[in-house]
Image (tube, coloured by chain):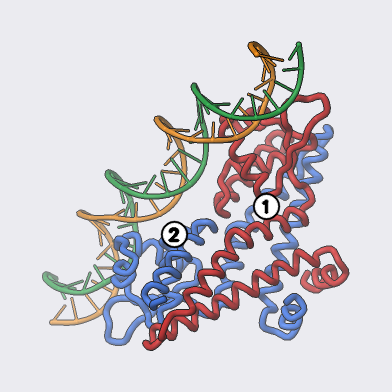
Chain colours: A red, B blue, C green, D orange
Amino acid sequence: MQFDEAKNKFVQTWGALGSQWGINKTMAQIHALLMVSKEPVSMEDIMQELQISRGNASMNLRGLMDWGIVYKANKPGERREFFIAEKDLDELATKIAKERSKREIKPALKVLKEVSAVDGNTSEEAKHFVAQTKKLYEFVASADEMIDKVTEYKDNWLGKLMMKILR
Amino acid sequence: MQFDEAKNKFVQTWGALGSQWGINKTMAQIHALLMVSKEPVSMEDIMQELQISRGNASMNLRGLMDWGIVYKANKPGERREFFIAEKDLDELATKIAKERSKREIKPALKVLKEVSAVDGNTSEEAKHFVAQTKKLYEFVASADEMIDKVTEYKDNWLGKLMMKILR
DNA sequence: TTAAACTTTCAAAAATAATTGAAAGTTTTT
DNA sequence: AAAAACTTTCAATTATTTTTGAAAGTTTAA
C-alpha cells in the first residue's frame, strides 16, 4: 500500500470508529490526521485534506482542545495557528478516561443515587427497582474508581506489575 | 421521590447516556426498563410505557438480543412473547465488552496492521506515520487483551485480588 | 385449513445532528 | 487608526439516523 492511500484509509477508519463512540466523524478524522502528522498542521491544511469548511474545522478543533487532546502550536515566524495532537498514547487514554468520567459517569452516578432513594418502597416492584439501581450504582462507581486507579498507577511499579499479570 | 417518577427518570437518563455511547436512545431505554422490571415485560407494555411504535419496539428488542443482553421469556399459558434483561451486572459487562471487542476493536486492529505496512517508507512523513500507527496497534491490542483478561478472571481468586488492589 | 393473535419488515416521514459559508470578531502589522 | 490576515459564530441548509405504521410473515388454536 502507498503512503497516501494508507494515510487516507487510517483517517477514514478512525472517523467511522468515532461515530460508534459518540464522537462526530469530522472530529475523529481531524484527530487521526494530527496523530500521524509529524509537523504541526494549519487549519487551511486540515480543510484541504479532509475537504471540509472553515466553520466545521474551527468548531471541531475547539472540541478536540476541550477534550485536552489537541493543542495549538505556534510556528516561529508564522502568523496563523497550527495544531498538534497529544501523541503519547498513555496520556491520551488518561485524558479521555478522565474526561468521560467527568462528563458521563459522574452525572449518571448522581441520578442513580437519586432514584435509588424512592420513598416508602412498599410494592414488590418498588423494592426490586431500589435493589437494582443500588447494585448498578455500586457497580458503576467501582468501575469508575478502577479506571481512575489504572490510569493513575499506569507508570509506577505496581501498575507495571499488574499490567504484566493481566497481559 | 415517588416510584413512578424515579423509574421514569432512570429510563430517561439511561436513554440519554446510550446516545453518547453510540447506542440509540430507544434501545437504551428499553434496556433500562427491563433492567428494573421484576417480571418479564411484553412488547405491548414496552410500547405503552415508552410511547413508541410496534416496529420500533420490535427492531430495538432484536438489537438488544443480538447484543446478548436481553432474552425472550415465555410466560406459561401466555401466547405472546415476554422479554427480560440480563440482570447480573458482571455478566452484562462481560457481554458488552466481548461484543464491542468483536464489532469494533478487532476490525480497527486489522486496519491498523494494514496501514502500518506501507511500501518503501522513504520520506520522513511516511516513517512517522508507520511509527505512530505501529504504536497505536500495540496499544489498542494490549488494551483489548487486558479487557479480555479482566472479564475472564473477574470471578476467580486472582481477579478478586487484583480488584482489591485496584480499589 | 382457516382464522386469530401476534411479530417482523421496510419504504416513507419525522426528528436529530452535522455542515456550510458569509458576517462578525480578533489580533497583528503598517 | 486602518488595513490585512486570520478565526469564530450561527442561521440556514444538507445529511444521517430514527421512527412510524401498514402490509407481509409467522405461529398457534379451533
- Going 40% across and 83% down the picture, which residue do you hit? A126
A10 lies left or right of A26: right
Q: Are marks 1 and 2 on the same chain?
A: yes
Q: Out of B64 and A87, give the one closest to the viewer.
A: A87
Q: Describe the element under mark 2 as helix, strand or loop.
A: helix
- Going 29% across and 68% down the picture, which residue do you hit? B48
User: Badge 1 sits on which subunit?
Assistant: B
B5 lies left or right of A5: left
A56 lies left or right of A115: right
Task: Return the mark for residue A122.
Answer: none
Q: Out of A154 and A73, give the one closest to the viewer.
A: A73
Q: Describe the element under mark 1 as helix, strand or loop.
A: helix
Badge 1 or badge 2: first in the primary sequence: 2
User: Badge 2 sits on which subunit?
Assistant: B
Residue type for callout 2: Lys
Residue type for callout 1: Lys
Q: Residue D7: where, in percent of width, then height?
A: 65, 31
Q: Is residue A49 visible?
A: no
Q: Residue A2: where, in percent of width, then height?
A: 73, 35
Which residue is labeled 1 in the image?
B110
Q: Residue B122: where, in percent of width, then height?
A: 84, 33
Which residue is labeled 2 in the image?
B25
Q: Quick check: A11 above or below D26?
A: above
